Image: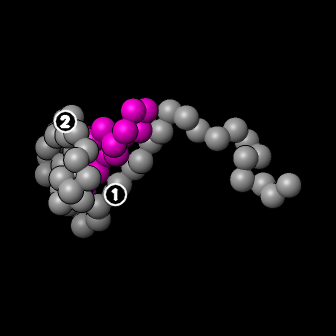
Amino acid sequence: MEELASEQGWQRVEEVAEEGARQVLWIVSPGTSLTYTEDPVSHNAYALLVGEDRPQPGFFRSK
């Protein structure tokens, strides 16, 4: 994820390491952020993309 963020030029805002877990927050674009979490207990990593401009209910239904 670090390499992708660097290649894309995303602004790294914050990094928190606590009890072995690690979270990194990037600003992807205005109104959109990406949080990457590494969980040493489950040996998994998660990426969460959040945008402020969410589609209204029914946006994806075919008309």
Q: Would you name the residue on which mark 1 appears?
A: 46
The residue segment tinted magenta is 25-39
In the rendered image, residue 47 lying in the magenta stretch gets the answer no
Type of secondary structure dominating the magenta stretch: strand
Position of the N terminus by quadrant:
bottom left
Q: In this image, 4 relative to 51: left or right?
A: left
What residue do we see at 41% from left, 47% from top? 49
Residue 62 at x, y percent in the picture: 81, 58
With respect to residue 7, does 24 lie above or below?
Answer: above
In the rendered image, residue 34 lying in the magenta stretch gets the answer yes
Q: Are marks 2 and 1 in contact (CB under 8 Å)?
A: no
What residue do we see at 58% from left, 38% from top? 54
Pick the residue in front: 6 or 1.
6
Q: Secondary structure at mark 1?
A: strand
Residue 26 at x, y percent in the picture: 27, 41
Identify the disc placed on residue 14: 2
- Categorize mark 2 by other alpha carbons within 10 Å: few (<14), some (14-19), many (20+): few
Residue pushed farthest bottom? 43
- Categorize mark 1 by other alpha carbons within 10 Å: few (<14), some (14-19), many (20+): few
Residue type indicated by callout 1: Tyr
